[in-house]
Amino acid sequence: MTVAAHQRLRQRHDVGDGSYSIRAEDVSELPSPFEDGNGLISTAPDAATVITGLNTGDIWLTVETWDTEPPTELQDWDAVVEVPYTSTTGDAQIFEEWTDNDRPPFPNLATAGPGSYRLRAHARGRDTGRQADLIEPNEEPVEEHLLQIWPDTERPIAILKMTDQVGAETLS
């Protein structure tokens, strides 16, 4: 049986201060990107912070929501980490640093409503993003991320792959 993504959207996404976040609308305090010490993503109830190599500008971001665990693909990625994610509200949005763009919003990631989820974050090009530091709106992004999320029981953090320098420097 083939498992298919419930929703999938790939587009440019703006980052600031070397990270971006997922959060419920009413969350104002985010976890430190280095809090969980896995080199890529930190979580707290209703929030997550993802570490980028790029300081400011656009990355390519793909978001996939799944009903069950998707296949694990490591080959083309520099970093892949799975974390537990808890949504107490049923609201989990990719936060936009700047809202003056004409991009459609990413879908709500908490597709099954309040509860426990598994969030798999993938990244490639973070070392190149760090070297670039800033990507202007007219420039092609050099960094790409993929977020996959599905309802699941809470399990420990799992570092599936970590080969980039950005991740290696932030491992605890």
Image (cartoon, helix red, strand yellow):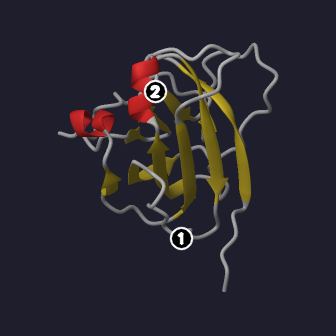
| Above or below: residue 14 compared with residue 105 | above
How many discs mark residues in the rendered view?
2
| Residue at image location 54% in from the left, 31% down from the top | 142
Residue 34 on image: x %, y %: 29, 32
**Left or right of 125 in this view: 3:** right
Residue 63 on image: x %, y %: 64, 47
Evaluate whether residue 30 shows in this view: no
Pick whichever, 42 or 163, lies toward us. Answer: 163
Mark 2 element type: helix
**Left or right of 1 in this view: 102:** right
Pick whichever, 150 or 122, lies toward us. Answer: 122
| Above or below: residue 42 compared with residue 131 | below
Q: Residues within 10 Å of mark 1 (few under 14, many from 20)?
A: few
| Residue at image location 45% in from the left, 51% down from the top | 77
Under mark 1, the amino acid is: Pro
Task: Please identify the quarter of the rendering in which residue 41 is found.
Answer: top left
Residue 146 on image: x %, y %: 56, 47
Mark 1 element type: loop
Residue at numbered disc 2: 129
| Residue at image location 35% in from the left, 63% down from the top | 155
Screen quadrant of the C terminus: top left
Task: Give the mark, 1 or 2, whose residue is nearer the N terminus.
Answer: 1
Pick whichever, 71 or 54, lies toward us. Answer: 54
Evaluate whether residue 101 shows in this view: yes
Task: Please identify the quarter of the rendering in which residue 49 is found.
Answer: top left
Q: Residue furthest bottom?
A: 1
Residue at numbered disc 1: 71
| Residue at image location 53% in from the left, 70% down from the top | 71
Q: Nearer the viewer, mark 1 or mark 2?
A: 2
Under mark 2, the amino acid is: Gly
